[in-house]
Each structure stands twice: as C-alpha cells, then as structure tokens.
Amino acid sequence: MMALMLRRRVLLLAALVAGGCVRAQAGPPHEAGHFRDPDLVELTSLDPGIKLDVRYATDRNFVGRPVYSEARAFLQRPAAEALLRAHRALRAKGYGALVFDGYRPWSVTKLFWDLTPPAKREFVADPRKGSKHNRGCAVDMSLYDLATGREVQMASAYDEMSPRAYPGYPGGTPDERARRDHLRAAMEQEGFTVEPNEWWHFNYRDWRHYPILDVPFSQIAQRP
Ligand SMILES: [Zn+2]
C-alpha cells in the first residue's frame, strides 16, 4: 500500500514537472543595463609561467567527475592583465600563479548548486544571481614554488568546504598563513578582493560591467 502511494506521488510530481508547474531554471538570469562586450583572454597566452590545474576538467573536484571538457582558463581582458601583473610581482617572493578556474559557464554554476547540500551552499553561487566567475571576473588560484614547480601547501585544500577555507582562518602553520597572505596582498594590489570564505577566490573590481555568460570554452572567440 505504502509503495503504491509513493509511486502515485512520484507520478504526480513527474506530471507537475512535465506540465511546467514545478519548473527548473532554464537559463541565466536576465539582467537589465548596459554591459561591456565580453573579451575573454586565455591566461596561458599571456605568460607561459602562469600554470593551470583545472580541477573541474578532471575528477579531482567536489563533484567527483569532470564538468569541463577542456582544461583551459579565461578572464575578461582587464582582469587577465591584472592577474598577469600579480603573477609577476609574486615571482620576487619565489612563487608563480597556479590557476584552478577562471570564467565558468553559467550552466556549470547551476550544476554545482543543484549538487551541493543546502547546508554547504555558502560555498557555491546561487544560479538565480549568477556568479562573478560567470562574468569572467573571478579567479580561483593558489601559488606554485618557482624552484620546484610544485603547488604550495595552504591552510586548506582548494574547494574545501570548511572554516579552514576562510582567508582569516588562524590555524594551519605560520608558513601556510604567510603564503596565503602573500597571494592575497599581490591580488589586492591589482584590484582584486578575496572572497570572505575562500582564500583561493578573487573577484576583479570591474565585475559589474560584464554580463553573465553561458558560452562553452570551445566557442570563445580569441581576439589578437
Ligand atoms: Zn571561485
């Protein structure tokens, strides 16, 4: 009897979804206003010393499977050039930029939201508002050691959904905190601000001027 009732409920829900009564968000939010034309730049084209570790193109991410078909990273041109300057400034301290993610198509933000339990959603963007990654104005990054080429240890892993991810987390080793603070200072110098609960996520100051995009990497037109 219970099984029959449950089955009826499932069928009813399926009918409501099919009829459009329960509707999933179909596409990016519509925003009024004037925006700059997108000009997404591939970061590795600016300086081969900017290293990539695009975890979302692998299964080493919180989803557990690739959500990008290509390991590439882009930012809007002024943000990309600011990142390049930060990367060059960090060289004096023995580090280089290690980029995990830049521009992210809106449909991937939607997927992250849908897969994240409500209690952990402070760590993912609400697709109804879109993300600064969707505008090509946010970058997730860490540092690599110029001497070894290896990623440095920080106070938390990238995409770790815990208080260790906070930029002001007082734990970890002094070296981990110092590296985290070097990265933050270099990025702030170039017009980025750190996300309040993710030491690796930086927003570029002009993000409001760019629209939310849902263009796959393969369709990004590169200007010279
Ligand atoms: Zn991010």
Image: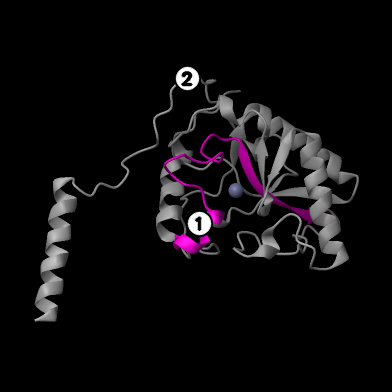
Q: Position of residue 170 (x, y in %)?
A: 80, 63
Is residue 111 left or right of 136 when viewed as pictured? left
Q: Residue at x 57, y 57 (%)?
A: 55
Within the magenta stretch, is there residue 133? Answer: yes
Q: Position of residue 89 (x, y in %)?
A: 85, 39
Query: Which class describes the residues within 10 Å of circle 2: few (<14), some (14-19), or many (20+)?
Result: few
Is residue 108 shown above or below 65? above
Within the magenta stretch, is there residue 67? Answer: no
**Residue contact between numbered discs 1 and 2, judged by CB atoms under 8 Å:** no
Image quadrant in which you'd find residue 102: top right
The residue tagged 1 is: 121
Q: Nearer the viewer, residue 196 or 63?
A: 196
The residue tagged 2 is: 33
> Is disc 1 placed on a helix, strand or loop?
helix
Q: Residue at x 79, y 68 (%)?
A: 172
Please state which amino acid type lies under the numbered disc 1. Answer: Arg
Q: Position of residue 23 (x, y in %)?
A: 25, 46
Q: Is residue 87 visible?
A: no
Please state which amino acid type lies under the numbered disc 2. Answer: Gly
Is residue 89 shown above or below 222? below
Q: Nearer the viewer, residue 56 or 185?
A: 185
Precedes in sequence: disc 1 or disc 2 = 2
Q: Which residues are magenta?
A: 116-145
Q: Position of residue 141 (x, y in %)?
A: 68, 50
> Is disc 2 placed on a helix, strand or loop?
loop
